[in-house]
Image (tube, helix red, strand yellow):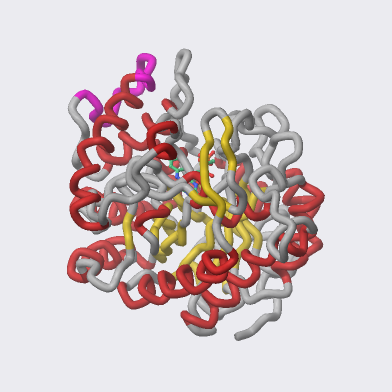
Amino acid sequence: MTDAATRTRPGHHLGAPLVLPCGVVLKNRILKSAMSDSLGDGAGNPSAAQVALYRRWAEGGAAVSIIGEVQGDPHALEKPGNLVLADDSDTALFARLTKAGTANGAGLWAQLGHAGALSYAPLGRPRGPSALELDGLICAELSADEIDQVPVLLADTAKKAKALGFTGVQVHAAHGFLLSQFLSPLFNRRSDRWGGSLGNRARLLIETIDAVRAAVGNTFPVAVKLNATDRIDGGFSEQEAAVVITMLDETSVDLIEISGGTYFPGASSSGGGRPGEPYFLDFARRVRELTRKPLAAVGGFRTYRQAAGAVEDGTLDMVGLARALVLDPDLPGVWTTDAGIDPEFPRFESPREGAVTAWYTLRLAALGGAPLPGFPIPASSGVPDANAALAAYEARDRTRHEVWRARFGRGRAGRFSDRFSTTRVSS
Ligand SMILES: Cc1cc2nc3c(=O)[nH]c(=O)nc-3n(C[C@H](O)[C@H](O)[C@H](O)COP(=O)(O)O)c2cc1C
């Protein structure tokens, strides 16, 4: 592997290729960031709508699309629409997905998920670094032996992803899921080698990256998504994130994608950053000099100017887009040729927690040609009903419970599942 920095500064045009440290060339600087699309078939395999959705994004011109929350352990699921990579996965369905998602020279990467303490309780086993019993978050503690198995599990999932035709993987260490839980003092109250000092809390992330790299070889992209901050008092802070970035600089990762926020109870669900600015751009500017790795940030990019500016001034090597590419999957093709057309973001009135993400998720189903009744691609006028989207989203998940259990067993029944909030949606 060439560990040498392949990025050159000052920055680049959004349409310029990017050579990753592993040697893979991405065709431009636009990353379709991970979204849990909830379009798995309920038994961990891809659906036809998912195939159509990733073809749509590939044709739209993004350099890479990342499928959110691809699981190796079905009991650590985020939602029952997740993909699960297992020995008996339907390889023909996955081949259709990876072929469609890699059309037009696009990459299709699997985000290696493990929801840990936030595992979907009706079907999973919520277990994190520490046992917690809070309003909206109840989980058991992982044993030291179980923690030792996490890098093994994610490395095996990465190997399966490669065999199934994905062209890269992303280790999910953001938003309060398992590896982010270990980084966060709010979730992680351990006093053994996995808790306490930042070095201990980051150990699982670093060991996971090393294990994943060993499983996929030196020429396969391995990215990481990391919080700049949990955006809650007592959580993982910007100062700590900067130190973790220096640790990542010593690993074999190919791309560090900065995000932020967590599903710990009481954490802010708003974007952060300066009003009207992408959320983590200031942080990216501060850490830019700390790493030779290609750097991306996601969150709050709404305009061509913001995206092009961040790459042209050398702050970022790639721009991550999520909601913008739900609203307009063709943006990468447009923005890489300098056309300054911006998507129109809907405004929601009094959405409940999780409702806006649910609305975007239902829009993904519509983009994949399988809209839920009442949720076609909406007209641009009018106020979209996010709360109705949330109800439809949750109802769809409930219909998948039996399918999931039929394939993966019953999960962790009992008091954890009974009391866990089911309103959380995005990841
Ligand atoms: C519908 C939806 C699902 C998401 N699922 C995931 C996910 O599975 N993994 C992840 O890391 N982030 C997930 N996110 C967060 C996005 O990747 C991104 O960090 C966030 O939406 C902010 O970027 P944006 O302003 O471009 O939308 C999701 C976001 C949305 C809207």
86 sits to left or right of 260: left
**Does 142 sit above or below residue 24?**
above
Residue 260 x/y as whole percent: 63, 44
Q: Residue at x 53, y 62 (%)?
A: 171
Residue 293 x/y as whole percent: 68, 68
Q: Residue at x 52, y 74 (%)?
A: 212
* Image quarter of residue 75: bottom left
Residue 295 x/y as whole percent: 65, 60
Q: Nearer the viewer, residue 129 or 368?
A: 129
Question: Is there any visible trace of residue 13 in the rendered image?
Answer: no
Q: Nearer the viewer, residue 300 or 252?
A: 252
270 sits to left or right of 357: right
Task: Quadrant for the N terminus, please.
Answer: bottom right
* Image quarter of residue 243: bottom right
Q: Residue at x 55, y 69 (%)?
A: 145
What is the magenta range? 374-387
User: Per the image, is 365 magenta?
Assistant: no
Q: Residue at x 34, y 44 (%)?
A: 413
